[in-house]
Each structure stands twice: as structure tokens, then as C-alpha cells.
Amino acid sequence: MSMNKPARVWVSNEKPKAGDILRVRAQMEHVMETGLRVDPATGKARPRHILSHFEAKLGGKLIFTWDPGTSIAQNPYIEFTFKARHSGELTMFWKDDQGATLTASKTITVG
Amino acid sequence: MKPATSLTRRHLVAGAAAAGASLALPGTALAQATAKTPLVGPLAPNPVEFKKTMEQFIGGATPQAEGLQLDVPVLADNPSAVPVKAKVTLPITEQDWCEELMVVAELNPIPLACRMQFTADTGTAEAAVRIRLSQSQTVHVLARMKSGKVLAAKQAVTVAASGCGM
């Protein structure tokens, strides 16, 4: 089963001043099978299995979503920025097209 | 440089012609190689889908080039993971922010690489991903602002080989 390994998440500053711009880098493990590759053993295309949705919330408020397609590289990497307006839990959520999910979080404390 | 006494005009002309031919050959061979091997089967490009994807995003707007900064390598050493970074440099305010960003690989079998959405709470509009490219092609990034303005940027990327079954 895929998506049982924890995601790797980096946040530029977990204790920012109000209004600072934070950068988030996150990577998780996923096979990202396009559905276009042919298995040489069977001669049939390997079924598509890709990460299809990612979202990030700060204190429950949605700040970023990402909908990858087949052209996204294996072990999807996403980087985004946001303005730290209030403290809260930065929660990240991944979901693939077979329904598997993964979550990660970082505590952001605005000083 | 002092010309040798035996060097006549005839020698020069002959030499130049030979040099020109030898220089021109690899160039034309390379051009033919890239043009003569279009990807077929599941990896073939889908120009109809590309046009549709772009038109659906743009709608009736006229895309403008200013305000969208794109960071994509001209020569990608690994076609299975080509870094693409996009940033909207227009002012992001409470009234006008970037609603959606789209990355499109023109000649990939499924051109739409990904969509990203921002909200009024984001306060910025910047994102980076790694995409795979089936062949050398142009990567397009489009952004739609809350005001309806559409920004467009593109970059031609040369890849060494196809991205691992993609």
C-alpha cells in the first residue's frame, strides 16, 4: 500500500511575525503511475494510480489546494507560500485516486 | 597570421566549401532526427486537448504576459522531474488575489499537469512543482486573478530523453 510513509515537510519559519511570508515545501512518496505505461510481462497498460488532491489549511482556513495530473513527477513535491496572519495549526492533506490519504501538520506561532 | 605563399584563392574557396558542408551536416541531421521521430501510441501529444485546456482556462479574457514570473530550466537534465516555479508578481490584496494557477505541458499526452488554487487567506501566489515531460516542448503557466485578469507565461524546455514512461 502506498502512502503509509510520513510526508517530509519543511516550513521556513514556525515562529514568524504577523504578516511574514512563509514558505512550505512538502514531499510524499507516491508511485504516480500514469496509466500510459505498458507492463512488458502482460502487454497491458498499468492502471493509472496518481495523487489527485492536496490541500493546506491554517487554523482550519483553506489557504492552498493543488490538483495534480499525470504529468506530475513521482513522489510529488509541492512548494507554496502564504502570509502568516494568525497562529494556528498548518495542516496538510493528500489524497490519491484510489482514496488513500495522508496528513501532516506544523504548528505556526505568530509572535 | 601570415598567409602561406602556396595559399591561392582557389584553395580558399575549396576549403571554405568543405568546411561549410561538414558544419552544416550535423545540424540538418539533428533537425531531421527531432522532426522525424514524433512520439506515437500512448505518449503521442494531444493538440486538441491542449487547445481545449488553454481555452477553458482563459475564457474570454486576453492573457497578459506581465505579472507572472516563471522559473523553468531551459535544459532539463532529468525529464522525469523538471522543476517549475511560478509566482504572481501583481499586488495581492484583499480585493484582488490569484484564484487559480495552471501548469500545462504542451506536448504531453495529457497536457494539463496540475491546477493550484489560492484563497483570500493565502496573501501570496507562488507555487513550485516537479513535472515530467514526454519530449522537448513548451511549458505554459496561466494564472487567473479574482478580477478576471488572466496572466500567461511560457518557457521552452529541452530534455535529453523522455520522462520514464511518461
Image (cartoon, coloured by chain):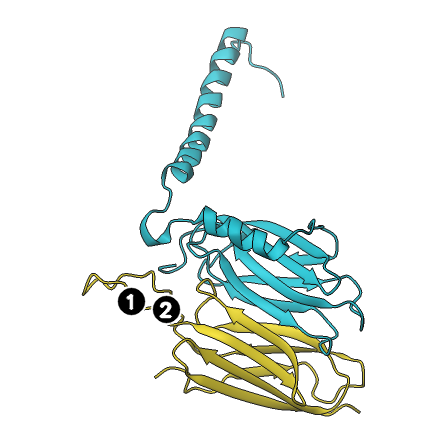
- For image coordinates 66% across by 53% down, the residue present is B152
Residue type at the position of mark 1: Arg
What percent of the width, then of the height, locates residue A19? 80, 81
User: For the point 41% across and 52% down, which residue is it?
Assistant: B161
**Residue at the extreme left of the image, as rendered:** A42
Q: Which residue is mark 1?
A: A46
Q: Position of residue A37 (x, y in %)?
A: 31, 61
* Mark 2 surroundings: few (<14), some (14-19) or many (≥20) residues within 10 A: many
Residue B154 sits above or below residue A77 on the image: above
Disc 1 is placed on an element classified as: loop
- Discs 1, 2 touching: Cβ within 8 Å: yes
Q: Dot 1 falls on which chain? A: A
Spatial CA distance of label 1 from label 2 is 7 Å
Location of residue A33 in the rendering, given as x and y in whole percent from the top left corner:
37, 68
Residue at the image position 63 percent from the left and 76 percent from the top: A64
Colour yellow maps to chain: A
Q: The N terminus of chain B lies in which quarter of the figure?
A: top right
**Residue B135 picture location, percent across and down:** 44, 50
The amino acid marked with disc number 2 is Glu
Q: Is residue A75 visible?
A: no
Q: Earlier in the sequence, mark 1 or mark 2?
A: 2
Of B124 and B55, nearer the camera is B55
Q: Which residue bears the numbered disc 2?
A: A33
> Element under label 2?
loop
**Quarter-wise, where is residue B2 in the image?**
top right
Q: Going by the image, does B134 lie left or right of B40?
A: right
Q: In the rendered view, tell whether residue B124 sits above or below residue B159.
A: below
Q: Colour of chain B?
A: cyan
